[in-house]
Amino acid sequence: MTTMSKKFQVLLTLVGLLWLCTANAADKQIIKIAYLSQERAVPAALSNLDPFIQNKGQLGAELAISDNNTTGQFTGQHYELKKVVVPIDGDLVQAFNQLGDDIGLVVLNVNSAQINQLADLPAAQHKLLFDAVSRDDELRGANCRHHVLHLLPSRAMRADALAQYMLKKRWQKWFLVVGPTSEDQLFAAAIKRAGKRFGMKIVAEKAWDNTYDARRTAQSDVPVFTQGEDYDVL
């Protein structure tokens, strides 16, 4: 085949693809997705290196829609994103109910306690909800809803993965430090469960008050806090 023939064949292929895209433009499947989040109060800063991002997740959703619509030109699909950000004192339930029946997919960026509250609404029964932020074990167990998909690993999954890594490294003596929040307590429980499951030994457990004293540093606090114990991992 001559060079001119090859170029002509490529040109015909491109023209054919262009014709298919044009012909199917009106027949594309429209997939509507809602991104629902609620603003949060800015927490106390622990470090300037870890800034609080109010619209965390929103930009990722927009990028995903853009990428999928590029592929959708060839798969006959078009994705539309409806962004709903509820103020701190706003009514999240009302915002969900106003999404409309034509939206079947909803990405939730809300607190763990609000996920099942929204999932149990009559308006949610024919929608598929994506939990994008929670790590609660209960939401994946007894309190799991059939139309909710959890995207992140749970606390138990993370603790099991950590324990398996420690087992591989033969770091079997753990010093467990537990923070003051309810989230800290739940993750500590997951760590204990994973440690027991994989044969680890918690040689000491202490509570950390997490006070914001600028005079305290990790270099000075940790040796004092952990002195007298023989451990592999803190």
Image (cartoon, grey):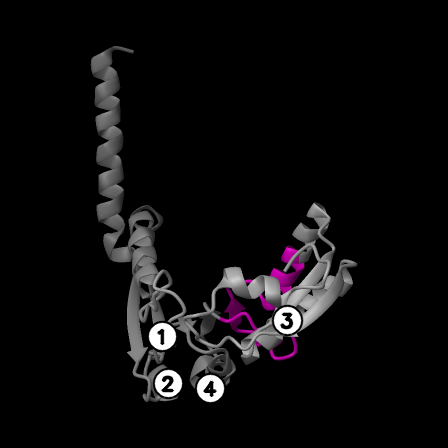
- The Cα atoms of the two marked residues, 3 and 1, are separated by 30 Å
Residue 92 - label: 2
Q: Amino acid at mark 2?
A: Leu
Q: Residue at x 27, y 38 (%)?
A: 17
Q: Which residue is mark 3?
A: 188
Nearest the eye: 62 or 73: 62
Q: Amino acid at mark 4?
A: Leu
- Answer with mark 2 or mark 3, whichever residue precedes in sequence: 2
Q: Amino acid at mark 1?
A: Leu
Nearest the eye: 224 or 36: 224
Q: Which residue is mark 4?
A: 121
Q: Residue at x 28, y 55 (%)?
A: 66
Dots 1, 2 in contact, CB < 8 A: yes
- The Cα atoms of the two marked residues, 4 and 1, are separated by 15 Å
- Report x, y in % for residue 131: 48, 70
Q: Which residue is mark 1?
A: 36
Residue 152 - label: none
- The question of residue 194 being in magenta is answered with no
- Answer with mark 2 or mark 4, whichever residue precedes in sequence: 2
Q: Which residues are magenta?
A: 134-162
- Report x, y in % for residue 181: 54, 79
Nearest the eye: 142 or 207: 207
| Residue 139 seen from this side | no
Nearest the eye: 157 or 21: 157
Answer left or right for 220 relative to 7.
right
- The Cα atoms of the two marked residues, 2 and 4, are separated by 12 Å
- The Cα atoms of the two marked residues, 2 and 3, are separated by 31 Å
